[in-house]
Image (spheres, grey):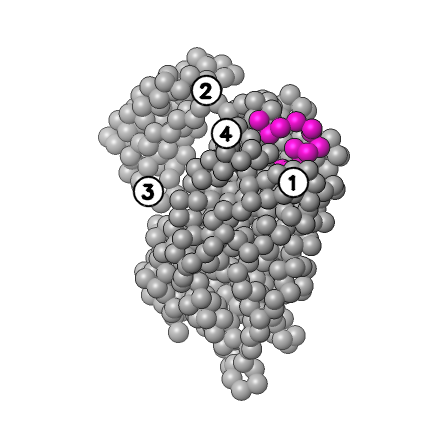
Amino acid sequence: MHLSAGWNAPGNREQMGKYFGTDGVRGVGAQDLTNQLAYALGRYGAYVLTKEHMGDRPKILVAKDTRISSDMLEASLSAGAMSVGVDVVLGGVLPTPAVAFLVRENGFDAGIVISASHNPFEFNGIKFFNRDGYKLPDEVEEEIESYIDGDKEIVETFTHERLGRYQADELLTSSYEKHLWRSLSEDLSGMTIALDCANGATSAMAAEVFQFAGARVEVIHDSPDGVNINDNCGSTHMGDLTKLVVEKGYDLGLAFDGDGDRCLAVDETGEIFDGDRIMGLIGYQMKQDSLLNQDTIVATVMSNIGFHSFAKKHGISVLQAAVGDRYVLEEMRSGNYSLGGEQSGHLIFSLHSTTGDGLLTGLLLCEAVKKSKKPLSFWREEIPRYPQVIVNARVPEEKKKAYLEDDVIRNAIEAFEREFSQDGRVLIRPSGTEPLLRVMLEGKDEALLQQKAQELAALVEERLNQ
């Protein structure tokens, strides 16, 4: 069995003719991400990830979020894995970071998560973790794709007693929760916290996790029905959480996304505390506790100047990776750093996890607030956020990188940075899915930034569309 090489799910690396995008395979459930494709991903993904251990009866963990299509895809994917002699353990609804932890903790050969993270319910996705709990490198994804496209074939025969089985394991949730509690050095007693679970994968466990840690909590959007995941809730729509925190006087609020690998916060005044600020505060506390390896945080090129200024003030170095959690993790692993993340609230703590973990981020943020004996709003003021303005410049696909070699564009960028000195910067990023360059300007004066960004985007279009 193989699928046409021309098949592409929306949002994937279409220009490369591949199935995998930046975070697994994504598409509309049953339309793009079909049962046929799920079966193929289960079959060939399981084979590639376990073929070195076939004699040991390989075993993989499969979990999902709360989308209506997740059950259907789980069945097809699991059937594919069992067709190559792999036993499947069904974890049910679990956050993505739970799978990453449980794979390495329980000796699974691989883990697979069925989720489309913060996207609307009609989308779904399939992403893999290797036996060490890490997402797959490009070369492994490419090998799986080569089997799907028929460029490689499985020569072994899996029939009779060589077929895989599946079973459910309801104890996996408690194992993950205990892991989260062990990450805290002190409890959260005395804190009042509001939680927004996005009607997603954290819905059944978030309250218990924070209550057991000692906090008094109220939870909203924790009643998934298959179609309400991320629907005007969670980390992408924080209005309900903000209102709840202010009206009931909670110390802070935490918002997770659909698969539970991100967390954003709201302070007691109702202002949003983004991923940069969360990294800043937790990193500061980790440095105080001698847990911040080399006094360094790995951020991305999108992290705000205000975050950089706070880090410098407190003797913390900041390394910049490309946008995307895989690039943050690569930098962290190469230098043995203990904290990294993105503005989106996708934070990685290498002392505890191999991928972003929203519940863990929320726990450590609350712990840092309690240890500081100051409200979260104090830290929002301490970690300023400069305005960022992004304007898209439409350019031909083949000229996305030409701005690097254009003297006129380069001179315009240098002129802007001279004008704003240390209080501003320019960042130009090619879009991964559209013929666009994203022109981002950052500084103190938002109106002036908007004007300058429009001017620079127009210059880019003029120069690169000739």
**First in sequence: mark 1 or mark 2?**
1
Query: Any mark on residue 364, and which?
Result: 1
Q: What percent of the width, then of the height, locates residue 37?
A: 39, 66
For numbered disc 4, what is the local secondary structure? loop
Query: Any mark on residue 443, and which?
Result: 2
Marks 3 and 4, how far apart at CA: 33 Å
Q: Nearer the viewer, mark 3 or mark 4?
A: 4
Mark 3–mark 2 contact, CB under 8 Å? no
Whether residue 365 is in magenta: the answer is yes
Residue at mark 3: 434
Q: Nearer the viewer, mark 2 or mark 4?
A: 4
**First in sequence: mark 3 or mark 4?**
4
Mark 2–mark 4 contact, CB under 8 Å? no
**First in sequence: mark 3 or mark 2?**
3
How would you rate the neighbour count of disc 3 (Cα within 10 Å): few for under 14, some for 14-19, many for 20 or more?
some
Q: Is residue 274 visible?
A: no
For numbered disc 1, what is the local secondary structure? helix
Disc 2 residue type (three-letter): Gly
